[in-house]
């Protein structure tokens, strides 16, 4: 498979998702803690305050402040920020595990903030599943019983739920451990059980709240790869919470960066690395090698009159490090084309400038 195939597939998926109706639309979402919480979103003066100023003036804490974004079908949408940024509160507001103070959370055309208790239970049982940092497995139940627990709560018959549980256990690579108990498994294997449990009900959306942050680095990498594999196989829409930028860049089609409850920037990994909106984002991405994230779309230039355009062709969404060998080996500038249209060219100069910037930490 050519090195750019994966990148082209991902870009095509993003374009298709962007054209479709969002699965989740968040509009002006607030979660304020405090005795006067409801008054905060209604007051222009209070809305304009920083989190610190609001706390000093009212005693309220705005965990999520006026947040708006869309999640496209089949997208891996990552929300990241430092501890206290509001990202975990946000993901809990999406299913009303925490009640929002104001705003809208539109899921498949319906504002879940207006759902009654019955509708909300149905949403959580059938439409949206969540994977937590702390696995929450039932210690006295075997793996297959943990995985099938949500189906049992639904009232699914035993034969059907055991069949489905066996299918997702195989999907997450736990075949042979069906009859083990959680304390007989490693941390990574326990998290696979949690993932299988979330998949068992065949939800439309999977929410991940820092699911791998307690795992050892090698196990964490394996689980990240597992999420990527599962996404390719089952195509679920995913909202993934993390404080780790490398994890966000590896998993996310788009990334939302939060600070003090507010949106700082939203975009692809290349958007964040190539065009950070402020010093906060710039500091976040400063240690990320640009050649690992930026695509040819970001570094291509217009052809010059003296360019020989008989060189090889690559797509605009090929990552620079994947294109470097082909560009440096070519005797003529590489043509960057999409659907037969010439978008620009890339030569040694453009490639080496990005690689040099990556090596210097620029």
Image (spheres, grey):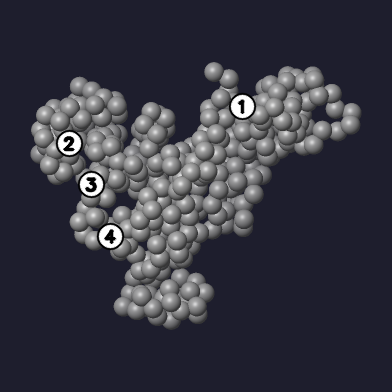
Judged by depth in the image, the label closer to the viewer, 3 or 2, is 3
Q: Crowding near pointer 3: few (<14 within 10 Å), some, many (20+)?
A: some
Q: Residues within 10 Å of mark 1 (few under 14, many from 20)?
A: some
Q: Mark 2 or mark 1: which is in front?
A: 2
First in residue order: circle 3 vs circle 2: 3
Marks 1 and 3, how far apart at CA: 42 Å
Q: Is residue 146 visible?
A: no
> Residues at badges 1 and 3 in contact (C-beta under 8 Å)?
no
Q: What's the mark number on residue 322?
A: 1
Instruction: Please state the horizontal and vertical placement of residue 327, each as a whole percent of the image.
Output: 72, 24
Dividing the image into 4 quarters, which one contains the C terminus? top right
Category of crowding for the residue at label 2, using alpha-carbon neighbours closer than 10 angstroms: few (below 14), some (14–19), many (at least 20): many
Q: Earlier in the sequence, mark 2 or mark 4?
A: 4
The image shows residue 12 at horizontal and vertical percentages of 55, 34
Res 173 label = none
The residue positioned farthest toward the right in the image shown: 306
Local SS, label 3: helix
Q: Quadrant of the N terminus?
A: top right
Image coords of residue 93 (percent x, y): 34, 58
- In the foreground, 2 or 290: 2
Which label was assigned to residue 115? 4
Q: Please name which of the two marks, 4 or 3, marks the residue nearer to the observer.
A: 4
Looking at the picture, tell me which residue is in the foreground, 15 or 11.
15
Residue located beneath label 3 in the image: 125
Identified at 67% across, 26% down, the residue is 314
Look at 68% across and 40% down and name the residue there.
298
- Report the mark closest to the observer, 4 or 1: 4
Can residue 309 be seen in the rendering of this structure? yes
Q: Earlier in the sequence, mark 4 or mark 3?
A: 4
The residue singled out by tag 2 in the image is 148
Assign a secondary structure to mark 4: loop
State whether residue 283 is above or below residue 339.
below
């Amino acid at each position: 498979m050519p090195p750019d195939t994966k990148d082209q597939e991902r870009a095509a998926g993003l374009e298709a998702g962007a054209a479709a109706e969002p699965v989740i639309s968040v509009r002006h979402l607030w979660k304020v803690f405090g005795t006067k919480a409801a008054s905060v979103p209604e007051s222009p003066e209070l809305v304009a305050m920083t989190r610190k100023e609001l706390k000093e003036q009212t005693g309220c804490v705005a965990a999520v402040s006026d947040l708006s974004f869309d999640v496209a079908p089949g997208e891996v949408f990552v929300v990241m920020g430092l501890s206290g940024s509001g990202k975990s509160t946000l993901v809990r507001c999406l299913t009303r595990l925490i009640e929002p103070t104001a705003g809208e959370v539109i899921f498949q055309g319906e504002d879940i903030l207006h759902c009654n208790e019955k509708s909300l239970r149905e949403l959580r049982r059938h439409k949206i599943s969540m994977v937590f940092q702390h696995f929450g497995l039932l210690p006295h139940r075997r793996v297959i019983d943990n995985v099938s627990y949500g189906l049992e709560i639904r009232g699914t018959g035993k034969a059907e739920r055991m069949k489905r549980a066996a299918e997702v256990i195989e999907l997450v690579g736990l075949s042979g451990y069906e009859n083990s108990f959680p304390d007989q498994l490693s941390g990574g294997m326990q998290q696979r059980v949690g993932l299988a449990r979330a998949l068992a009900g065949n939800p439309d959306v999977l929410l991940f709240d820092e699911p791998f942050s307690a795992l050892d680095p090698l196990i964490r990498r394996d689980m990240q790869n597992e999420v990527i594999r599962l996404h390719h196989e089952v195509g679920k829409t995913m909202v993934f919470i993390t404080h780790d930028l490398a994890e966000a860049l590896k998993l996310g089609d788009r990334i939302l960066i939060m600070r003090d409850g507010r949106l700082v920037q939203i975009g692809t990994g290349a958007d964040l690395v190539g065009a950070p909106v402020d010093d906060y984002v710039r500091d976040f991405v400063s240690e990320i090698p640009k050649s690992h994230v930026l695509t040819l779309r970001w570094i291509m230039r217009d052809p010059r009159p003296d360019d020989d355009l008989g060189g090889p062709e690559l797509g605009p969404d090929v990552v620079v490090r994947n294109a470097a060998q082909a560009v440096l080996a070519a005797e003529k500038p590489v043509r960057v084309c999409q659907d037969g249209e010439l978008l620009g060219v890339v030569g040694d100069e453009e490639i080496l400038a990005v690689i040099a910037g990556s090596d210097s930490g620029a």
